[in-house]
Image: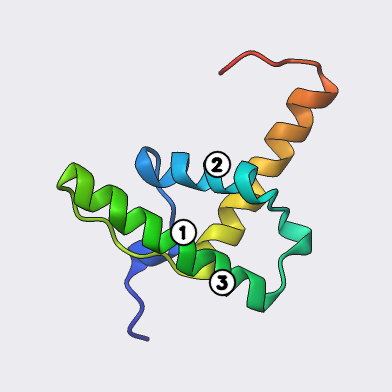
Amino acid sequence: TGIHPRTLKIDSGAEFYLCTEFRELLQLKSFEMTSRKSVQVTIEYNNRLQAAAAKSGKSLIEKHPRALLEKLGKIEPKITKCITDKNYKCA
């Protein structure tokens, strides 16, 4: 289909931390993400990802909007559980 497999996954490290920063900064919630908003957020995410890659001298692959939505969907239940359990320690 012409889509690189790594565009569909947000790995740990810089990609993950940028995703969590974006989630906090933009108050992203997967259930509020429309197709248009998802694309707009992913474009900005990829711009920041490329800037971080240029700064560190590493190459990172731009992400597909689906990757960001899937990562948000995995992060949100973990955050909710920590809040309901009143567990605010870093894992």
Check disc 2: other Cα within 10 Å, few if <14, some if 14-19, many if 20+.
some
Numbered disc 1: secondary structure:
helix
- Say whether residue 21 is left or right of residue 1: right
Kindly indicate whether the residue at mark 1 contacts the one at mark 2 (C-beta within 8 angstroms).
no
Q: Which residue is mark 3?
A: 40
Q: Which of pointers 3 and 2 lies earlier in the amino acid sequence?
A: 2
Numbered disc 2: secondary structure:
helix
Locate the C terminus by quadrant: top right
Q: Which residue is mark 1?
A: 45
Q: Which residue is mark 2?
A: 20
Q: Amino acid at mark 2?
A: Thr
At a point 57% along the width and 51% down the height, the residue shown is 71
Q: Residue furthest left?
A: 57
Q: CA distance from mark 3 to mark 2?
A: 17 Å
Q: Which of pointers 2 and 1 lies earlier in the amino acid sequence?
A: 2
Q: CA distance from mark 2 to mark 1?
A: 11 Å
- Say whether residue 34 is left or right of residue 43: right
x and y percent of residue 45 in the render? 46, 59
Which image quadrant is residue 56 in? top left
Is residue 90 depicted above or below 54 in this figure? above
Q: Which of the numbered marks, if any, corresponds to residue 85?
A: none
